[in-house]
Image: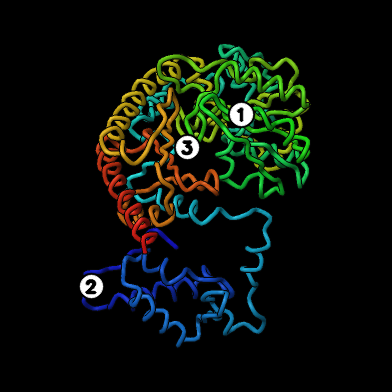
């Protein structure tokens, strides 16, 4: 539903149910809700407009009377008529059929709710995986664009692999991490998510199996699942992914590759140890199992740098390495990179040219200037210090309000604290109640569907005041939910 239209609750001329009636009727008549589409449930509409369900029932009743919608058992409430279907000699296209026929899977419902809620400026976002607008270098970026940036700048298309100037600078940047990568083995992509999409399209067959850490960020997106892949989870401990079952799972599922976030893992915040990295690479080499290393958080360490990336230890071209500016310089730049063997990079660049004909030349130039001028390193030092303060502030609140109901890790970098509620509880009611109170959570079951005990907390986005008020209320909501469930068990 559109986000820019709201009920006028102070209107004495038009009752609330009539406003909702007119809103839905416009959606139908304008073709935004075509014939055959299922409209939102009464519950969702009541939550959207913040009215009693009876108001929604009244509005929908009038639409039924007008012959615009109809309730069907097992299908919900469907649009059955609009202006075009009444006037046209032939019926309009059934867009609902097309929507359901697409190969790309929809997000799970909870992710859709989270994505919508993140656009609400009144929401306290306790799990959001991006930097607060206060930490983004907006003014410096504006000055950089208005200054002398003309030497390599173009508004035309870049080369298939991305700007050579940027790839040369990224090559130097990676060298500081111990990664030897020539510009020809680097592909510029429009963010890490596109990198994963290109890999799924260009390197994997439908039905391939992918080994992932459990829990995993990949479970919260459907980029591989929509391409017909299957994810198989491997447990973690405080050192990172556990290695015991990799060889067995690889053979059992004929796994095509392994995906890992070794540095400041999403969602757990875990930092894989140096020894575990070396052993993981040895096992994968032995099993001839390629690795995708997602290192988007690798620069965000606090006291000491993370161990060298897996790619720095890779002497066989086993690892595809992914980096991004989304978590450090700004998600709106939509810029990242993949490093790998040249034939693989050539293949992925060909797929990329077929999909978007290259990443933004403006973003590529901006990132190149920041990396080459020293601005990026200065910015990193600033956000490391700020995120460390935010982490410590969040930990102090957890110590004060959560010590009897939960336990948690102390991350050494990145954005996330993996909060473990001591007793399993029904996550969905907790999520929904928090959302009603303008507190947005990232529950553990979007990263592991069987998880009813964890929340991903982020100290990167919400303000200090929001972190404090949101977490204090969250502790109260958890206690209330635990109390309800104990009471129901007693009865």
Q: Which label is found at residue 173?
A: none
Res. 242 mark: 1
Asked if 176 appears above or below 351 in the picture, the reply is: above
Mark 1–mark 3 distance (CA, rounded to whole Å): 34 Å
- 121 or 75, which is in the foreground? 75
Residue visible at 78% across and 26% down in the picture: 288
Asked which secondary structure carries label 1, the reply is loop
> As drawn, is 491 to the left or to the right of 215?
left
Residue found at the very far front of the displayed protein: 490
How many circles with numbers are drawn on the protein?
3
Where is mark 3, residue-wise? 332
Q: Position of residue 167 (x, y in %)?
A: 62, 21
Q: Of callouts 1 and 3, which one flags the residue occurring earlier in the amino acid sequence? A: 1
Type of colouring: rainbow
Circles 1 and 3, Cβ within 8 Å, touching? The answer is no
- The front one of 285 and 14 is 285
- The residue identified by callout 2 is 11
Element type at mark 2: loop
The residue that appears at 52% across and 30% down in the rendered structure is 265
- Check disc 3: other Cα within 10 Å, few if <14, some if 14-19, many if 20+: few
């Amino acid at each position: 539903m559109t986000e820019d239209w709201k009920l006028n609750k102070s209107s004495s001329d038009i009752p609330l149910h009539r406003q909702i009636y007119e809103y839905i009727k416009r959606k139908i008549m304008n073709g935004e809700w075509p014939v055959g589409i299922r409209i939102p449930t009464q519950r969702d509409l009541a939550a959207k407009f913040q009215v009693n369900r009876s108001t929604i029932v009244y509005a929908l009743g009038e639409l039924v009377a007008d012959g615009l919608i109809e309730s069907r058992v097992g299908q919900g409430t469907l649009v059955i008529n609009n202006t075009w279907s009444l006037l046209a000699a032939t019926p309009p296209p059934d867009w609902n059929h097309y929507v359901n026929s697409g190969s790309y899977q929809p997000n799970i419902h909870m992710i859709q709710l989270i994505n919508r809620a993140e656009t609400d400026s009144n929401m306290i976002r306790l799990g959001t995986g991006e930097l607060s607008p206060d930490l983004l270098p907006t003014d410096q970026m504006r000055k950089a664009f208005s200054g002398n940036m003309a030497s390599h700048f173009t508004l035309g298309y870049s080369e298939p692999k991305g700007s050579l100037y940027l790839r040369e600078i990224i090559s130097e940047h990676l060298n500081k991490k111990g990664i030897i990568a020539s510009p020809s083995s680097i592909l510029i992509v429009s963010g890490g998510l596109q990198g994963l999409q290109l890999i799924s399209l260009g390197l994997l067959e439908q039905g391939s199996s992918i080994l992932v850490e459990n829990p995993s960020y990949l479970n919260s997106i459907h980029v591989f699942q929509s391409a017909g892949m299957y994810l198989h989870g491997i447990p973690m401990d405080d050192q990172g992914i556990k290695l015991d079952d990799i060889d067995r799972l690889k053979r059992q599922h004929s796994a095509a590759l392994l995906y890992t976030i070794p540095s400041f893992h999403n969602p757990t915040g875990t930092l894989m140890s140096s020894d575990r990295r070396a052993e993981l690479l040895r096992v994968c080499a032995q099993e001839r199992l390629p690795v995708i290393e997602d290192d988007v958080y690798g620069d965000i360490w606090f006291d000491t740098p993370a161990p060298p990336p897996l790619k720095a230890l890779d002497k066989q071209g086993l690892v595809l390495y992914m980096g991004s500016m989304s978590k450090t310089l700004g998600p709106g730049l939509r810029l990242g990179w993949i490093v790998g063997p040249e034939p693989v990079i050539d293949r992925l660049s060909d797929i990329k040219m077929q999909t978007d004909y290259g990443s933004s030349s403006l973003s590529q130039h901006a990132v190149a200037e920041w990396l080459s001028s020293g601005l990026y390193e200065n910015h990193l030092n600033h956000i490391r210090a700020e995120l460390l303060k935010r982490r410590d502030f969040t930990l102090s609140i957890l110590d004060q309000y959560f010590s009897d109901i939960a336990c948690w890790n102390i991350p050494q970098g990145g954005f996330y604290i993996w909060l473990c509620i001591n007793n399993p509880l029904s996550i969905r009611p907790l999520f929904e109640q928090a959302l009603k109170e303008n507190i947005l959570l990232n529950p553990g079951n979007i990263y592991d569907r069987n998880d009813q005990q964890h929340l991903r907390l982020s100290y990167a986005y919400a303000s200090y005041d929001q972190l404090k008020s949101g977490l204090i209320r969250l502790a109260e909501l958890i206690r209330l939910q635990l109390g309800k469930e104990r009471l129901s068990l007693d009865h």
